[in-house]
Image (cartoon, helix red, strand yellow):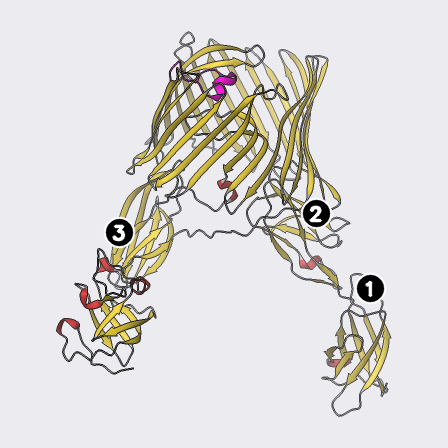
């Protein structure tokens, strides 16, 4: 490289001739060397960068800069920038203002997008929920069932409810749906029965047909709303600590210059983020900023879409196939900015058409303001519906109000097919902590609705207006919790009600509670203790008593086994005695086997250890059972579209067996199962003890070769060696330095759970 004198362009002397050369230089910015090697053009003593090279060096130009015809920018043309070239060290030293440095990007909670495909093996399952009752000498029973077929091409499910009692005997089909999801596009397609997509200011309806909808649940790691960040700049290397609502979240090191810390882990609501910066000399600066995050908002550029076409379903859970005429709907949301989300909705049929727009906007760090306007109706006389709302939730203090009002001419799909007109919904609330402990909240709600009767197709106009106040607090004894609620109804004889209650834990899983209420001149007192059966092997129970205008005593017992949840309840009251028995569970057919299990709502796996029984299986390092006589174990509660770690205990594997691996990561599709196969191979191995014709062990370091496969093994102490994959009849050759080769033959018979020791085997010279 051409040797050059060190120079500053502002006072350059002895400008070199134009060599038109390229220099390979280490670019050091403001004293920070990040081993940033760039090929820089040099013309008439000036150094020229491309914009890409400036960006790669952590630099940015604000505004326009003079460029040559080939798009290069001379450092001499940039005001406030100075440079020095050390030709011998092949280093370019730049001094630039802080505002020309690209901020260091430091994510507090980096999203590790797991885009590996989910997988499902083919199978079928039947979820069932049965109930048997006996009351006043009469019996009844019901069965809620779901038949589900699943595989890599989607899920086909059918739900039905069968009821038999002295007053009703019927079977009703609930839903029949075929679903396919694509993680890459975050789309789910449904064919059959579904609920159409909607927004906060629309009313969903059940439909049958085709649906395409955005499904953020396909990416559990994806945070759809914008999370706050904080920025700063330092002159010397420093450490930065970040606190969110007083909780420490991260510590990181930053280089001199500007920096930004993004993706702070927060939940929906407001709070504050604090940054503590410490340099090497112990100097410390603090900065605290408020923030507000809301799950109602979408990140900038993120979209959500739902499109449906089909027929509106009526009388759900009463009739199996009551469908109206054709209908279609569309809902769309778009994150215009991190603080503004726009939305629109369209729906229509041969009877009615409705459409509207809305928006959710973050107002500073105060809360979220929402608004909507829709037009819909029959024919030439459409009506309007408007909505407005505001929500503030910071720490334990919250308040909000919302109004959704439709005039008498406004109709949507729901009202066109049986639900009546929307009417008016008004709600206002405030809640805050009290200085002495506890919290207090007030809610006012007013609603005008049209109650629709599916059987006689009649609509009744109902208006309700209530004011509710609640105080709740932890009590200073036995880890108890108490509450008092007062309610005033403005419409029904100005009725008042008061509810009071207390609850406390008993042991690890049980709770006890007592309560009382006074309403409309009647009073009730209740006392209850219960323990739920949560995990397999748990026993649950409940005892309760109610006194007042209606008195009753109840007792219940339940047990959660490997194959289902069973329960029994008895009740004695003013109206007589009643008994109830319940059984919930699932039957699963997969990989040629049938399993009895608890109700399956999410993913699951069948662990296969190649027929090896009694092997302990762990889910996320938590023991979940041992394989059965077929080497199989059914594992419930896997998280769909997430990586689930399954492992086996290698200590349960016999010595004559080898494992390819003892842990697997599986990612099942929604409501589907995967086969988690742990390949296990019988080694057919044996320890051989080799001796010569004098019965002296062959020397250490001899090399034994299995003639059938050419596999070699060293001979160890006492003439011992080890071979796998032995046949019934085997021949061995042994080479010993300084001795003639020898050979031998031997037979092998495997021993279950053990490695046989064969010998002493006499190695015959020349054999």
Residue 50 counted in the magenta span: no
Task: Report the span colored magenta.
Answer: 404-422
Q: Earlier in the sequence, mark 2 or mark 3?
A: 3
Element under disc 1: loop
> Mark 1 Cα within 10 Å, few/some/many (few <14, many 20+)?
few
How many labels, in total? Answer: 3
Above or below for 178 versus 524 = below
Residue 418 counted in the magenta span: yes
Above or below for 177 versus 379 = below
Q: Quadrant of residue 500?
A: top left
Q: Check whether the beta carbons of the residues at disc 2 and disc 1 lie within 8 A of each other.
A: no
Q: Is residue 374 left or right of residue 42?
A: right
Residue ID at (62%, 55%): 664
Residue that sits furthest to the top in the current view? 493
Mark 2 and mark 3: span between their CA atoms?
A: 55 Å
Q: Position of residue 123 (x, y in %)?
A: 69, 42
Element under disc 2: strand
As drawn, the label of residue 333 is none
Q: Which residue is mark 3?
A: 286
Mark 3 and mark 1: span between their CA atoms?
A: 71 Å
> Mark 3 Cα within 10 Å, few/some/many (few <14, many 20+)?
few
Q: Position of residue 278 (x, y in %)?
A: 28, 58
Q: Which residue is mark 1?
A: 751
Residue that sits furthest to the bottom in the current view? 738
Element under disc 3: strand
The answer to whether residue 374 is seen in the rendering is yes
Q: Which residue is mark 2?
A: 633
């Amino acid at each position: 490289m051409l040797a050059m004198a060190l120079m500053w362009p502002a006072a350059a002397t002895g400008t070199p001739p134009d060599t038109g050369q390229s220099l390979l230089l280490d670019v050091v910015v403001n004293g920070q060397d990040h081993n940033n090697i760039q090929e820089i053009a040099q013309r008439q003593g000036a150094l020229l960068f491309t914009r890409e090279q400036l960006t790669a060096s952590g630099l940015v130009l604000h505004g326009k800069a003079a460029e040559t015809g080939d798009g290069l920018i001379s450092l001499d043309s940039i005001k406030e920038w100075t440079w020095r070239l050390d030709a011998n060290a092949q280093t370019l030293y730049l001094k630039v203002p802080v505002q020309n440095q690209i901020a260091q990007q430091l994510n507090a909670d980096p999203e590790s997008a797991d885009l590996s495909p989910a997988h499902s093996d083919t199978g079928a399952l039947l979820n069932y929920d049965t109930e048997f009752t006996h009351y006043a000498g009469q019996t009844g029973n019901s069965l809620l069932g779901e038949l589900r077929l699943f595989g890599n091409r989607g899920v086909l499910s059918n739900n039905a409810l069968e009821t038999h009692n002295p007053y009703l005997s019927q079977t009703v089909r609930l839903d029949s749906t075929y679903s396919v999801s694509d993680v890459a596009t975050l789309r789910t397609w449904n064919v059959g029965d579904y609920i159409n997509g909607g927004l906060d200011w629309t009313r969903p309806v059940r439909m049958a047909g085709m649906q395409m909808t955005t499904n953020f649940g396909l990416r559990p790691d994806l945070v759809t709303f914008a999370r706050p960040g904080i920025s700063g700049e330092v002159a010397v290397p420093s450490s930065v600590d970040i606190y969110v609502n007083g909780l420490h979240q991260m510590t990181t090191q930053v280089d001199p210059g500007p920096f930004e810390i993004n993706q702070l882990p927060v939940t929906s609501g407001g709070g504050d983020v604090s940054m503590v910066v410490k340099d090497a000399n112990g100097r410390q600066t603090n900065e605290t900023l408020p923030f507000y995050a809301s799950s109602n908002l979408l990140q900038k550029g993120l979209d959500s879409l739902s499109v449906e076409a089909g027929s509106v379903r009526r009388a759900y859970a009463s009739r199996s196939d009551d469908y109206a005429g054709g209908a279609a709907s569309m809902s769309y949301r778009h994150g215009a900015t991190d603080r503004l989300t726009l939305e629109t909705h369209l729906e229509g049929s041969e009877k009615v058409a409705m459409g509207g727009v809305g928006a959710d906007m973050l107002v500073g760090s105060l809360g979220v303001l929402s608004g909507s306007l829709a037009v819909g109706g029959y024919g030439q006389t459409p009506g309007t519906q408007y909505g407005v709302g505001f929500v503030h939730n910071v720490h334990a203090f919250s308040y909000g109000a919302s109004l959704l009002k439709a005039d008498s001419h406004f109709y949507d799909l729901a009202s066109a097919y049986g639900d009546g007109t929307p009417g008016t919904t008004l709600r206002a609330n405030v809640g805050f902590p009290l200085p002495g402990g506890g919290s207090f909240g007030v809610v006012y709600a007013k609603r005008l609705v049209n109650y629709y009767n599916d059987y006689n197709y009649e609509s009744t106009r109902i208006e309700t207006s209530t004011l509710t106040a609640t105080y709740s607090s932890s009590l200073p004894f036995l880890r108890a919790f108490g509450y008092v609620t007062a309610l005033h109804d403005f419409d029904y004889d100005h009725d008042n009600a008061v509810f009071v209650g207390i609850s406390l834990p008993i042991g690890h899983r049980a709770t006890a509670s007592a309560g009382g209420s006074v309403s409309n001149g009647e009073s009730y007192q209740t006392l209850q203790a219960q323990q739920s059966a949560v995990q397999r092997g748990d026993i649950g129970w409940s005892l309760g008593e109610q006194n007042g205008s209606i008195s009753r005593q109840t007792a219940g017992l339940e047990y959660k086994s490997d194959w289902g949840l069973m329960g029994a309840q008895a009740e004695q009251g003013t109206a007589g005695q009643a008994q109830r028995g319940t059984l919930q569970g699932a039957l699963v057919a997969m990989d040629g086997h049938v399993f009895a299990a608890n109700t399956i709502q999410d993913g699951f796996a069948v662990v296969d250890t190649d027929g090896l029984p009694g092997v302990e299986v762990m889910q996320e390092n938590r023991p979940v059972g041992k394989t059965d006589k077929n080497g199989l174990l059914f594992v419930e509660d896997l998280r769909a579209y997430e990586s689930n770690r399954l492992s086996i205990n290698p200590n349960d594997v016999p010595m004559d067996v080898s494992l390819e691996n003892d842990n697997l990561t599986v990612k099942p599709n929604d409501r589907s199962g995967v086969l988690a196969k742990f390949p296990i191979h019988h080694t057919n191995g044996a320890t051989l003890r080799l001796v010569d014709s004098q019965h002296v062990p062959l020397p250490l370091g001899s090399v034994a070769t299995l003639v059938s496969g050419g596999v070699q093994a060293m001979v160890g102490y006492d003439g011992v060696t080890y071979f796998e994959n032995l046949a019934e009849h085997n021949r061995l050759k042994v080479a010993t330095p300084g001795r003639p080769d020898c050979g031998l033959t031997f037979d092998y018979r495997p021993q279950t759970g053990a490695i046989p020791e064969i010998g002493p085997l006499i190695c015959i010279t020349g054999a």
